[in-house]
Image (cartoon, rainbow, N blue to C red):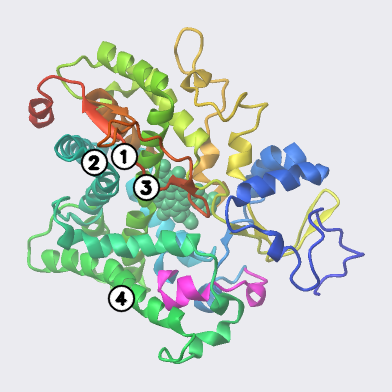
């Protein structure tokens, strides 16, 4: 209603309804397939929108397209450049009621976000990553040990080990991945993030006044649920931080990212929200890293479907690393096939196929089309990474597509970088994620062959192609067998490293 439709020509799309527009046309599952279909049906948005515009819109016009689709109430007052806060679609449930407004990944584009992202980058920029190699390698060894001991619980290990590893890096928490009591609350808190993103939506997001309903009223179940989750989310933010702080106060600081940040602020810790900034950076890093878990599940699933790719990677690992030690980060440059396999994994099953939604903060024009401030702008990662022209036969899993005939990485084939999002909001954990995925996946490939499970009757259990398909692309729970392939594996896991 703010804009005269005749004067402003909107980009073409489904006809929609008065007031609601195309809201009801957006599917809750596999939305990226529908967006790609629309791109073809409304042909001006075709290929150009998916490939070129992503760069032009999110990077070249990043000043306008870097906001998040999030609550007006929490942050707008701290973002003077935002001209449309009043029209911000609220995510009351996630942000206000459950407390995820503290996560800077969901925050309004502005000074507070900028400060937190800057603090995060100090510890996750490319030059900072070697400082994390030792703990990541230890994590990969622990994962190998757990897969050897209890292979049937592989999905749990894929969740637990990256989580324990990053908690150690952020807070110097020395957790036993087998001890459920110490980490379950933190994991459950992080899981509410993915669950809320995958949820079909809450009425309170459409009618914010419902947040004032008393919790005991019938129909206010969302408030009881939110209160339970909020406790977990607040604990995730507060407890590990205060433990690090009290260790510092008692003269026993342990090296980790949060203690380094506290040290940087010294006596200014209580001023200008510095403490809340550090709390946010710590907890956001932990939840961001949950995506590694989904990538590992997609990897095991791919190995069941494409055993020839697994075999080629194992041949390369045997040739380069040998069979009498486990891989190290320094092996990476000599393992182009394994590197290509990880690229193909991220391309074939991008973890966030419709990426995270950006929101525009000023009116803009794209050619003749008007994009009003406050628009939801979705980069269809799936469509980009499954584009036939860039990646022929896109549903096939072919690490070779990233290699030259001589077997080296082919610089002319585009890296599937869009899996990490776009512009100023691009994933700042991507350099860490690359190192982590290389170490976890090269260890698993070197130590085990992943095969389809066999049931008690001797029948092969076929993996179901179903996946959780709302926000994240992660397979539904499935079975697989992990067969050790190196002699004396246990000894290799515990061999001291130089
Ligand atoms: C394979 C692993 C990963 C994938 C595919 C991934 C993907 C993404 C995507 C798509 C976004 C949204 C980008 C956008 O809005 O355009 C994002 C944001 C973010 N990721 Fe990652 N991520 C991964 C791993 C990690 C790790 C390991 C960390 C932490 C160490 C991390 C921390 C973050 C943070 C803090 C943000 C919010 C950035 C902001 O809003 O400014 N991610 N990630």
Mark 2 / mark 3, whichever is N-terminal: 2
| Disc 4 versus disc 3: nearer the observer | 3
User: Where is mark 2, residue-wise?
Assistant: 152
User: Where is mark 4, residue-wise?
Assistant: 231
- The quadrant of the rendering that contains the N terminus is bottom right
Q: Residues within 10 Å of mark 4 (few under 14, many from 20)?
A: some
Please state the total of marks drawn on the protein image. 4
Q: CA distance from mark 2 to mark 3?
A: 11 Å
User: Where is mark 3, residue-wise?
Assistant: 477
Judge by depth and name the residue closer to the eye, 117 or 403: 403
Q: Position of residue 393 (x, y in %)?
A: 61, 24
Mark 1 / mark 3, whichever is N-terminal: 1
Q: Residues within 10 Å of mark 3 (few under 14, many from 20)?
A: few
Examine the image and state in which quarter residue 434 appears.
top left
Asked whether residue 496 is in view, the answer is no
Is disc 2 placed on a helix, strand or loop?
helix
Give the residue drawn at x 23%, y 61%: 184
Q: Which residues are magenta?
A: 82-100
Mark drawn on residue 129: 1
- Image side of residue 65 versus residue 97, left or right: right
């Amino acid at each position: 209603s703010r804009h005269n439709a005749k004067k402003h020509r909107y980009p073409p799309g489904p006809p929609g309804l008065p007031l609601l527009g195309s809201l009801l046309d957006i599917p809750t599952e596999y939305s990226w397939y529908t967006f790609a279909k629309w791109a073809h049906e409304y042909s001006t948005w075709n290929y150009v929108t998916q490939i070129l515009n992503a760069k032009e819109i999110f990077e070249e016009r990043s000043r306008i397209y870097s906001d998040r689709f999030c609550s007006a109430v929490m942050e707008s007052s701290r973002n003077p450049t935002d001209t449309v806060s009043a029209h911000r679609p609220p995510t009351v449930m996630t942000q206000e009621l459950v407390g995820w407004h503290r996560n800077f990944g969901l925050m309004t584009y502005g000074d507070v976000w900028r400060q937190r992202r800057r603090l995060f980058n100090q510890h996750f920029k490319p030059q900072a990553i070697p400082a994390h190699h030792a703990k990541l390698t230890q994590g990969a060894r622990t994962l190998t040990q757990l897969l050897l001991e209890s292979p049937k619980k592989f999905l749990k290990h894929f969740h637990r080990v990256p989580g324990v590893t990053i908690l150690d890096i952020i807070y110097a928490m020395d957790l036993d991945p087998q001890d459920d009591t110490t980490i379950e609350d933190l994991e459950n808190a992080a899981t509410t993030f993915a669950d809320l993103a995958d949820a079909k939506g809450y009425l309170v997001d459409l009618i914010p006044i419902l947040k004032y309903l008393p919790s005991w009223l019938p129909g206010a179940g969302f408030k009881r649920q939110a209160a339970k989750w909020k406790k977990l989310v607040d604990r995730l933010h507060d407890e590990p931080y205060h433990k690090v702080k009290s260790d510092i106060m008692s003269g026993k600081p342990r090296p980790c990212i949060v203690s380094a940040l506290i040290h940087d602020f010294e006596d200014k810790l209580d001023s200008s929200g510095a403490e809340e900034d550090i709390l946010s950076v710590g907890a956001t890093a932990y939840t961001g890293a949950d995506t590694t878990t989904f990538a590992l599940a997609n990897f095991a699933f791919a190995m069941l479907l494409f055993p020839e790719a697994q075999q080629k990677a194992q041949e390369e690992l045997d040739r380069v690393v040998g069979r009498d030690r486990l891989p190290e980060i320094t092996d990476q440059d000599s393992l182009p096939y394994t590197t290509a396999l990880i690229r193909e994994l991220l391309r074939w099953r991008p973890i966030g196929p419709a990426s995270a939604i950006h929101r525009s903060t000023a009116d803009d024009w794209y050619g003749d089309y008007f994009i009003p401030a406050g628009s939801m702008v979705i980069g269809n990662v799936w469509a980009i990474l499954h584009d036939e022209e860039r990646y022929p036969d896109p549903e096939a899993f072919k690490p070779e597509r990233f290699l030259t005939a001589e077997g080296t990485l082919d610089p002319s084939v585009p890296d599937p970088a869009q899996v990490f999002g776009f512009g100023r909001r691009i994933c700042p954990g991507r350099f860490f994620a690359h190192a982590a995925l290389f170490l976890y996946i090269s260890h698993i490939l070197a130590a085990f062959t992943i095969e389809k499970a066999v049931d008690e009757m001797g029948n092969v259990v076929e993996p179901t192609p179903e996946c959780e398909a709302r926000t994240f692309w992660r397979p539904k729970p499935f079975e697989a067998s992990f067969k050790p392939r190196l002699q004396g594996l246990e000894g290799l896991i515990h061999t001291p490293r130089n």
